[in-house]
Image (cartoon, helix red, strand yellow):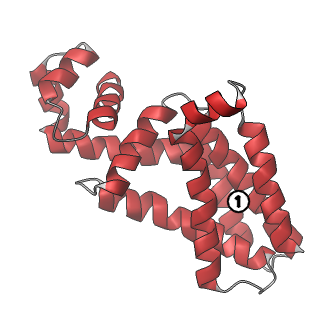
Amino acid sequence: MRILHAALAAFGSKGFAAVTTRQIAESAGTNLPGLTYYFGNKEGLYLACAHEIVASFRRGIGAVGEAAGGALSRPLAREDAAGHLKQLFAALAHFLLSEAGAEDRAMFVQREMTSPGPAFEILYAELWQPGIELAAALLERAAGGRLSTTDSRVRAVMMIASLTGFRSGQRVVAWTAGDDDHVAQITAALNEQIDAFCR
């Protein structure tokens, strides 16, 4: 795990092309043969970072997502859909903004979003698409048919992007709103948005 943590930090801050496996090995306190033994080459290590991001996401909010997905397979009242959506975004806010390693994961992901590289397909197929589809399906149910599937997807992306914006813009937020932990305030604001869809 030391190698993956070092790699996530290096790739997130500098990008794939600017980092060498030797630098990562030194940062992790290991030797280059040890790194290549476990990961093969730089691309193998980069892809392992993407898989670790997906795994950490599942550890962080997997149970909430599974409960919401299970609820969608049955008849679901609008209020219950909204409740699951609130729980999902509360867990996502905590994962993106509070958990250890969140900044390194966010920077890695942002690089893949703005300049797709070897990990893009992994992150899209295992993280972005399922997350957007789940949030959109809950939004559609919570809105009681007032939102189309496309409208629900767009709103789901907007809500998720607002959280990633807080992660990348944390210094600006701290300068304008203080250094407090803003997760509760952000969650409350998202809950208000969800309630508006249910009216």
Identify the residue at image location x=72%, y=47%.
90
Helix, strand or loop at mark 1: helix
Query: Which is more toward the observer, 187 or 135?
Result: 187
Left or right: 139 in relation to 47: right
User: Of all residues shown, which one is farthest toward the front?
Assistant: 176
Q: Position of residue 104 (x, y in %)?
A: 42, 33
Rendering quarter of residue 117: bottom left
| Classed neighbour count for the residue bearing mark 1: other residues with Cα under 10 Å, few (<14), some (14–19), many (≥20) | few
Q: Quadrant of the N terminus?
A: top left
Query: Which is more toward the observer, 44 or 150?
Result: 150
Q: Position of residue 168 (x, y in %)?
A: 50, 40
Identify the residue at image location x=71%, y=38%.
183
Residue 14, visible in the rendered structure: yes
Q: Position of residue 92 (x, y in %)?
A: 63, 48
Q: For mark 1, what is the residue?
A: 67
Q: Quadrant of the C terminus?
A: bottom right
Left or right: 14 in relation to 90: left
The mark tally for this picture is: 1
